[in-house]
Amino acid sequence: MITEAITPSTLAEQTAAQTAGWRFDNSYARLPDYFRAEWKPTSVPHPRLVVFNEVLAQELGLNPAALRSDDGAQIFAGNVLPEGAQPIAQAYAGHQFGYFALLGDGRAILLGEQLTPDGRRFDIQLKGAGQTPFSRRGDGRAALGPMLREWLISEAMYALGIPTTRSLAVVLTGEPVYRETALPGAILTRVAASHIRVGTFEYIAARRQPPEALKILADYTIQRHYPLLADAENPYLSLLYAVMERQAKLISQWMAVGFIHGVMNTDNMALSGETIDYGPCAFMDVYDPTTVFSSIDTGGRYAYGNQPQMAHWNLIRFAETLIPLLHPEQKQAITLAETALETFPYTYGRYWRENMLAKLGLQPSSSTEDIVLIKNLLDWMHHRQADFTRTFRLLHPQALPEEDLYQQEDFKNWYAQWQQRLAQQAEPLQAVQARMQHANPWIIPRNHHVERALQLAVEQGNFHYLKLLHEALAHPYEERPEFATYAEPPTERMPGYKTFCGT
Ligand code: AMP
Ligand code: MG
């Protein structure tokens, strides 16, 4: 329990807090103390709001007018605590690139859970809010570039219809952070269904004490994300299946838009099924399953094509933590877990097929020929170094794409097979085309635009390009000619293009 009362320090702040619409509950803070540390954000000298997501604020039941001012900057910087907040840093562990480590929020503070007018519950977390008991050697801070990047990409993912944490605000702290060189410091306000990770279970499993801790966490997770499972015959086995299902679906959605998370460590896999932790993530331009952008992923562990296997690997770690809950006899518990885990490739395969068929305008099917049709197109893209997003978007059931690349014999052969397959579907081609437009984005966050926008913002304080890019990404399935520049693939490949974790 928080012992010290937290009250806004001046009358003006108090008024803002009252009208801002905060409605916190703090169920995670009420869990036993080994789940978290009570900890406040460290104040910063000159907070300035540079991004404020007013639409999201409204959805959360917040009052944008009360928060877009300096009062908002004070809150999103952690200088002033909104009424009802009970700030904590969460404890967790994780396998990072295959190796187990004790982690915890080293630079994030959970303010509490905002209850929305429509009865939902969202974590409000300040990322970059100063050191915590889990900081190890880190400074607890974040640089502006990576926080703007998380805002831009997480909001783009949301617009693409992919489950994700969201970004409510970015503030400049007025203090530099040192990452080889001095950079402007910033804090991101992250909104998430929760921050329970596979690594949270790993932390509790590794601790072993007290014995009831695992059950407390599993019950909490079920209650928060899978309430219908509470009445299942074996709720914990059902939880395993349900988490696998959501991850299978999520990763298939990533694959369908060419998203590469970049650092799929178990501490970055959320039990809610949301995409979380936008560090070195990036979208693939030219189709190549070995694509890796992250500067720290030298072995290509989290390459585009490895993501399903890595999700499976993480889920095995998750299942291991659940063993004591699955069955009183360990041997039987292991058999239950193994049987469940064996289904992952099939569950994933089912979602992947469904998504990829939709991209080709085809109804769900389990025919092997359809899978061959998808794979042949991907192989062709790989061979011809074709752009993944653009190729799908240009596909039209009634006409070959005009560009030279698509006039080659090998493409025409594939196209003829596709047309034959469409003909079996007894659906007007215009209807097929209309459906395809909802499966194939016209625009994705292209690395060359993201980099340019971030560079202008960080180095010149010019946010114009970034805001336009953000707007361009807000309706990704609509072709909007005024944003055409932002949809363009790079004119040449970006050899050696690297993204950084931003820690
Ligand atoms: P990430 O790579 O962002 O998933 O972070 C991995 C772990 O490192 C988490 O426990 C973070 O809280 C911690 N961490 C990252 N950056 C910092 C920092 N600047 N100061 C303290 N801890 C950090
Ligand atoms: Mg992380």
Image (tube, rainbow, N blue to C red):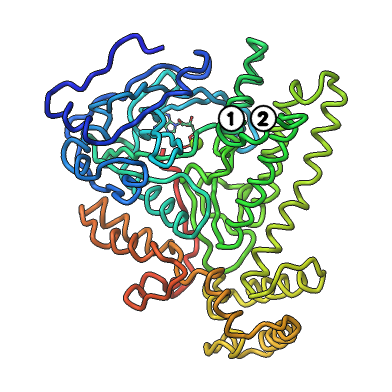
Compared with 303, 393 (above or below) is below
User: Residue at label 2?
Assistant: 230
Amino acid type, label 2: Ala
Pointer 2 with pointer 1, Cβ within 8 A: yes
Q: Is residue 33 left or right of residue 300?
A: left
Quarter of the image for the C terminus: give it.
top left
Q: Earlier in the sequence, mark 2 or mark 1?
A: 1
At a point 43% along the width and 50% down the height, the residue shown is 154
Which quarter of the picture shows residue 485? bottom left
Disc sitting over residue 223 in the figure:
1
Foreground residue among 297 and 87 = 87
Q: Is residue 50 above or below residue 70?
A: below
In the drawing, does residue 69 fall left or right of residue 288? left
Is residue 331 depicted above or below 377 in this figure? above
Instruction: Characterize the local packing of mark 2: few (<14), some (14-19) or many (20 or more) Cα atoms within 10 angstroms.
Output: some
Residue drawn where x is 28% and y is 13% of the image? 5
